[in-house]
Image (spheres, rainbow, N blue to C red):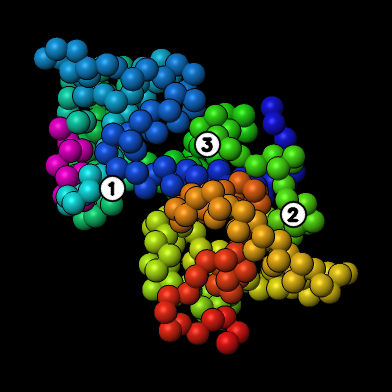
Amino acid sequence: MMDLASANWRDWYRFRHREECFRSGAAYEEYIAKVLGHFHDDFLNPFPTGTFGDGGCDGIAEAGSIAYACYGQRPGRNAEEELAKKVRPDFDRAYGVWATFSTWRIVTNAPVGPKASAVFVDLQQTHHAHPLRPLKIRHFGTDKLWTDMVSKLDVDVLDELFPGVPGAANVELQDLIPLLDKLGTESPSPDAAGTIQPVPPDKMEFNELPESSRVAFNSGRLLAPRINEWYAGASDPALYDAHGERFRALYRDIRAVTTQPAEILERLYVALAGSLTYERWHCNVAGFHDPPDETPCGG
């Protein structure tokens, strides 16, 4: 099994998981099938055959006791409406074909609004205390999928799901490991959300960042007070500037290979083991650009 130099590098896996969950349709559903295949050692994904189809089941596991349905939202459609219409037919078909399951799970990246929630509640009330066949009916969204399944996989399995994970031999800022450990063991400051401004939306739009990266950057801003505290206590007063220059050099090297914003970010995460921070984005240390007429950080 591969060793990680810092436990905080697991954040890189979570970043990649959320990227996969931003995919749509079949691409998302293929990712889910891979996750379930690793999580359950007896997972089966029935192949549709003739008029029987897949029996209303996108996966069966734990000796037939758990049945899965999966739905990846489609671009340009009302995802919540489609999910609400899909849940009951998928459940009814699986219920009629697979008599062994006692837990039914639907895994989806579609929003669960009031219509879909009403369907879930109705199914739960109908089946959770059924005298002959009581069932657990559960919804797995992006965060629950990470918490209950993906985060529990071994590191070598995560590396197979997300190729390119940073290892000790690839770390270009080894002296950031104490900072990563600090961020991984302390809670964010409760006042950070009010004192650290979000990354301007027009800046992220100008740099064509995917939605998943925008969420990650605005979550990462809560770490800024602890990052500043760590640099202030460093024995080398020039460490902040030295790291800034090395970030810029790394960005220039990556930019020479690709100009795609999402790929640039992924390469930065790989090279730095997930240590790219809100502060380095917002102050241009990593090299991303301000839209025209925006005052640079510190200007």
Place of residue 81 in the rendered image (x, y in percent of width and height, measured from the top left): 16, 49
Q: Residues within 10 Å of mark 3 (few under 14, many from 20)?
A: some
Task: Give the labeled residue for mark 1.
Answer: 110
Place of residue 262 in the rendered image (x, y in percent of width and height, measured from the top left): 46, 52
Q: Which residue is rendered at x = 59% and y = 74% of the image?
A: 283
Place of residue 281 in the rendered image (x, y in percent of width and height, measured from the top left): 56, 67
Question: Mark 2 or mark 3, which is nearer the start of the sequence?
Answer: 3
- The residue mark sitting in front, 3 or 2, is 2
- The residue mark sitting in front, 1 or 3, is 3
Task: Give the labeled residue for mark 3.
Answer: 162
Amino acid carrying mark 1 in the image: Ala
Q: Residues within 10 Å of mark 2 (few under 14, many from 20)?
A: some
The boundaries of the magenta stretch are 80-89
Amino acid carrying mark 2 in the image: Leu
Identify the secondary structure beneath mark 2: loop
Specify the label residue 173 is tagged with.
Answer: 2
